[in-house]
Image (cartoon, coloured by chain):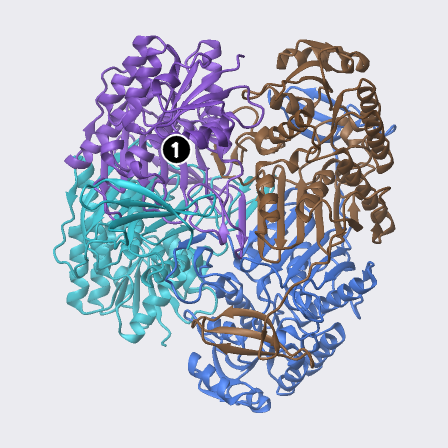
Chain colours: A blue, B brown, C purple, D cyan
Amino acid sequence: MRAHQITMLGTGLIGDFYTATLHSQRGRDRVRVVYSRSDERGAAFSERWGIPEHTTSIEDAVRHPETDVVVVGVPNFLHEEAVAAAAAAGKAVLVTKPLGRNAEEARRILETVEKAGVFGGYLEDLCYTPKSLKAVKAVRDGAIGDVTWVRSRETHPGPHSAWFWDGRLTGGGPIIDLGCHCIEIIRNFVGKGNRPIEVMCHTDTLVHPIADEDNAIALIRFESGAIGQFEVSWTFRGGMDLRDEVAGTHGTIWLNHFLRTGFEMFTAGGQGGYVAEKAETSAGWLFPVGDEVSELGYVDMFSDMFDAIDTGRAPQETLYDGYVVNAIMDACYRSAKARAWEPVDLFEWRGGETPRITGTHDTYEGKVVIKRETLPDGRVKMILKDPHSGDFTDVVVAAG
Amino acid sequence: MRAHQITMLGTGLIGDFYTATLHSQRGRDRVRVVYSRSDERGAAFSERWGIPEHTTSIEDAVRHPETDVVVVGVPNFLHEEAVAAAAAAGKAVLVTKPLGRNAEEARRILETVEKAGVFGGYLEDLCYTPKSLKAVKAVRDGAIGDVTWVRSRETHPGPHSAWFWDGRLTGGGPIIDLGCHCIEIIRNFVGKGNRPIEVMCHTDTLVHPIADEDNAIALIRFESGAIGQFEVSWTFRGGMDLRDEVAGTHGTIWLNHFLRTGFEMFTAGGQGGYVAEKAETSAGWLFPVGDEVSELGYVDMFSDMFDAIDTGRAPQETLYDGYVVNAIMDACYRSAKARAWEPVDLFEWRGGETPRITGTHDTYEGKVVIKRETLPDGRVKMILKDPHSGDFTDVVVAAG
Amino acid sequence: MRAHQITMLGTGLIGDFYTATLHSQRGRDRVRVVYSRSDERGAAFSERWGIPEHTTSIEDAVRHPETDVVVVGVPNFLHEEAVAAAAAAGKAVLVTKPLGRNAEEARRILETVEKAGVFGGYLEDLCYTPKSLKAVKAVRDGAIGDVTWVRSRETHPGPHSAWFWDGRLTGGGPIIDLGCHCIEIIRNFVGKGNRPIEVMCHTDTLVHPIADEDNAIALIRFESGAIGQFEVSWTFRGGMDLRDEVAGTHGTIWLNHFLRTGFEMFTAGGQGGYVAEKAETSAGWLFPVGDEVSELGYVDMFSDMFDAIDTGRAPQETLYDGYVVNAIMDACYRSAKARAWEPVDLFEWRGGETPRITGTHDTYEGKVVIKRETLPDGRVKMILKDPHSGDFTDVVVAAG
Amino acid sequence: MRAHQITMLGTGLIGDFYTATLHSQRGRDRVRVVYSRSDERGAAFSERWGIPEHTTSIEDAVRHPETDVVVVGVPNFLHEEAVAAAAAAGKAVLVTKPLGRNAEEARRILETVEKAGVFGGYLEDLCYTPKSLKAVKAVRDGAIGDVTWVRSRETHPGPHSAWFWDGRLTGGGPIIDLGCHCIEIIRNFVGKGNRPIEVMCHTDTLVHPIADEDNAIALIRFESGAIGQFEVSWTFRGGMDLRDEVAGTHGTIWLNHFLRTGFEMFTAGGQGGYVAEKAETSAGWLFPVGDEVSELGYVDMFSDMFDAIDTGRAPQETLYDGYVVNAIMDACYRSAKARAWEPVDLFEWRGGETPRITGTHDTYEGKVVIKRETLPDGRVKMILKDPHSGDFTDVVVAAG
């Protein structure tokens, strides 16, 4: 395991989260140089995190002789330029979400990195939360059978930086900001080899005076028949609502990443300061998160990325995954405009084929058993279907 | 307040729930006669609940000289006939959900009752849960501002009676069985005067070998711009999932009616019998509900119905409401088939007009304030939009 | 089932809760006359609840010719006088908690009623919450094996009426106010026939400038070896915390009656008014209760009382139970003062004998099996004890 | 920040947890050599975790030329010997909990390390859970005022290794196994400078055929008047219950570390294997923890220890803390035997003095304000105490 020296591009909130993670606990990897457009912000950032150097030149940053990894944490509209510089410098490049402002831009970014032959990673932290990793593993181990439906919800009262609100710079509203998380979470649960076929999306701008959506709901239909459902909003009140629900033919998973994680505090007031990302109040009942960089997946994400670099394997979240997410978001915007189901257009599908979800059914005296239910008195009621007439009957039998 | 004598039509699970409610606690109203197609089931039912008489004739039941109210708890395909008999007998008629198998049938039922001039009530219990009643009141009192989104979810592993599975007898699958609840819950939260405009619905049959859907998701767009979202399933694992979520411009409401209500029990086994409606296991962690007939709304529902009869007012849930629900469900089925948004067709709209949700926004130095956020250091960051250029900037100011 | 006409003594918060319950839903029993020391409060109360008459004379109230039941809802120091008057009038008497200010007073009240030969009931609502009733039934049905420990917790920021704070009028602080609930809840779970043997109690006055305790913790040891533990406080912040936890040899029960019942609301403010009994805030995250009179047990309590009167049986909660509770509270105060375990003194024990909790244990190759645990790899580890040497060993065997 | 090479003593479950933590994510510190009494277990352990060497000689292990830190993870009765060897080798020594089997042994261990002048750390992981760290910080920042009460609960169905059950080897039952965690958690919340004065403890052996307790409850009174309360059990059913509750004069904190952390899974069965430490079932509703080594505090614990070594400061949890915990546990055992409050005997108190909790109180028209409460109608009721007569009155005033 090598210790990596990192070029950090960007000093916004995401740069803080990334560097807080890298410099936390006993990690061996360190940020060596940070780039910011603003010398002042670069100086403050390097002071804050104990980084030896800062610069206002992307070129100088990515070509720093002691770094081997570039983390792209600049605003969306600068991703393509930053990735190109890093790839030209021959360094591993890790890009924050979303990969591009649209699928075309994401595809160009992907191709730039692949042509350069450098390592590429997609920094999708919420696919790496410890809960998600364990839950996805449980799904793969068969704990809930075939996945039929995934709901991923991410809502809060709106982003923290001005540029986030400008769809010209980001590519859109909360679909681009939050939906990218939800889509990739859904893909992890239904299986990344399960092709997204088409999308139905509704958007509206109900509260904020902006040109883009501030609320969106979408359904994604996958090849297996599974449905991914995401709900994103910049108008949610009460903090940041980060939940995933997964339904399978044999089980259910509910994950709550933020507002209900077993940490509850009532304060009559008097505590200044920071409770949790996007909390709305500092008195009354509050719901902090223990260690945000761990709970939100940053720790496991960087471990996967650096371990992948060290061992020459692909990371869990690749730039191709980032491209697929952009393609689905493009379909969402098209669908919201057309008010119709829209296909997901992919220049290339790198997954395989996934069969349709199918059930197997017992029979009882020549009829198909639809359902068994234990009655209050302990006996078992079976619902039966006659395969010929289509008629349904029930029968009550002794338990066992 | 008069004591009512009731004719109960039907001896299935819903008849049990209704009679358990009416005969619970210190209620003054009693079931006087019960009708069942089967003499055996009628006898067992009257024995079980201490009902003086049972009959296999609907006519005899509704014309019983001592009853003044008829409760229709027979299967969906018999509602029209039962209501007609009750109305002809000049008695108040309370009909279980859904009103009809489709909007046309529901409209005929509605008109039959209105022409007869008798009292009609729609037995939609889940709009009467104590949590729902208090939450809807909070919404009306302005606690969460304008409602922008309501999610109502009802899922379980499938119904308990054979006829429920036969769409020819019921009108469909879980949309008809469960979606009718969700739709009316949504209407209560967005406001019953808020016209449902159109519907987008996705259905699939993923697990059970049946002709109708076993899973469905729908979006309902209301005149105000609010979106109602329902998720229904007959393939959910883990019990009965009954949850509502309401988002408003100034607040949020989360209701959990079944699996997480503050009653948690682990048992290593050994307890026989009934835990809760549609629980799947009798060992391990179980989540019973305290008093099902109260928590599921039956108590408040009948109180409203009988009080309405006594005082000559309309009940909270009318047969017209039942008709609107059927009309929305018809639109859902059309939408799922057409894979397109479909209008909600109503022969008559009895609500008013609801204005579009609109926000008001502060300004700061000539710019629109998009958002205020407290930083870790206590200062306040404002996101501002220039109304002319559409550019966004942020500014950090001292608190207060 | 008869319809009862009730004399209500007292117009404080408990009188409101009682009458709200009696006059709720479709109940057949009504308050006919209300007594208050203050004519003004009596008039307001009867206006509020539609009660035909009010009086400032206890004698007139209890001797009202049309009432057959007297509900004693006056402050603690007036219970004895009120009960004596009601008993002398030959009427059923239902007394609010605690029965007396101490065991001696409670014993006199009990004997007064028993000598008069009238029906007596102890209005201990929290033993009648729907969750408690179902949980106690599950325990009796064997769902969690032998009960080893019960924790009952009731804490809030302090009572609502001035006289509650004056130990001279009530008998003490939160032990008297809240501990009486906890003790009887505990008795229901460990079994009412399970004799309370001795008590260890710690009290302190940490926050409020009062002569009595504002915090107390006690352990009650029962004949079976089970431990009851209660925590009461008038200094809790965040609302009213009402929780019970029950541990058994084969299971666990957790009940939450107030702050986490599946009803969660965030409001940015703007809603005036009443959220729930003893809530501390009207903005931020709030946790209302659906129907307080049902959830807190009042509905089932009065049903039990009136049904008991109608059928000539004893109610679930008798005046003797109230006496036992007072005797345990006396022991608590003695223990807190002596800082030692104190016996529970009862003039008469009306329960039976309860055997010591004992386990049965499997053996494996001549050793006692202490525990089985499934390992990550699926095999089973057994901890074994050699009955002769007292040495412990473990052995890992294949599953099954 | 140096990279440390570690000697690991012990290959039991705790050795696995420690090494899993040290070798997780991108940590710079590695286990270099592991000691086990059994060559076979040592070989398996080093294979499992990629450790270069293993040995059956404690001396060889602690004197390994490339290690600078010794982690003592052997059973309790071997701590003293292991620490002595490590201290003699002049290396930093980190000791698992509890420090000794009793205070006398703990004192000798402490003095051995202090005389040797090497770094000593007490591996009390549960004081380092991310939730605990953030909660303790909130308390120190004044979020809940003065702490009046801390409940720490740790219960499960019993330990996983044979020697744990033998009080001769460990020092006792669940007080020694689990109470040590609870006590130190409590000390962190009430303040480590807050001297523990005396203890009241009840123990019993209700289920398992062992010589030591299998259940215990204790109260610890601190100098400030704050009460620590712990509940430990080896007979809990349902998994591992790890909860802390903190009451303060201005707020409340509830922490749930295990069974309710926002990760809920229902499985109809079919998943083999490991869900979470001490889960009891592998089907039905399960409550896994995301990343156990992070959630249980191991990650932050080792970071604190190694950072303390690197910077020459004391760690959060010192060997003296371990000694204090043993002294409190000794008092618990004495108290349980004597059935009386017992003083906590400390050979030396290294904290300061802590003043008694005191409140300040507003006055209104010459009377002390006991409590303010908002009424349903919006007005404010104040409870007032006359400082001379001790009489209480209430007054209702307009809001504001």
Residue D98 visible (yes or no): yes
Q: Quadrant of residue B239?
A: top right
Foreground residue among B164 and B375? B375
Q: Position of residue A163 (x, y in %)?
A: 62, 77
Q: Quadrant of the C terminus of chain B?
A: bottom left
Query: Residue at (57%, 46%) from the top-left corner?
Result: B138
Residue B157's x, y, as percent? 68, 36
| Left/right of residue D327 with respect to residue C379 in the rendered view | left
User: Is residue B378 found left or right of D149 in the rendered image?
Assistant: right
Where is residue A171 drawn, in percent x and y?
A: 70, 73
For label 1, count other residues whose C-alpha is less than 10 Å away and answer few (under 14), some (14-19) or many (20+).
some
Q: Quadrant of residue A134?
A: bottom right
Question: Is B72 displayed left or right of B396 in the figure?
Answer: right
Q: With respect to residue D222, does B90 lie above or below?
A: above
Residue most extreme to the left: D347
Is residue B207 positioned above or below A57 on the image?
Answer: above
At x 47%, y 76%, the residue is A29
Q: Position of residue C395 (x, y in %)?
A: 40, 40
Label 1, secondary structure: give it: loop
Q: Which residue is mark 1?
A: C12
| Three-letter amino acid code of the residue under disc 1 | Gly
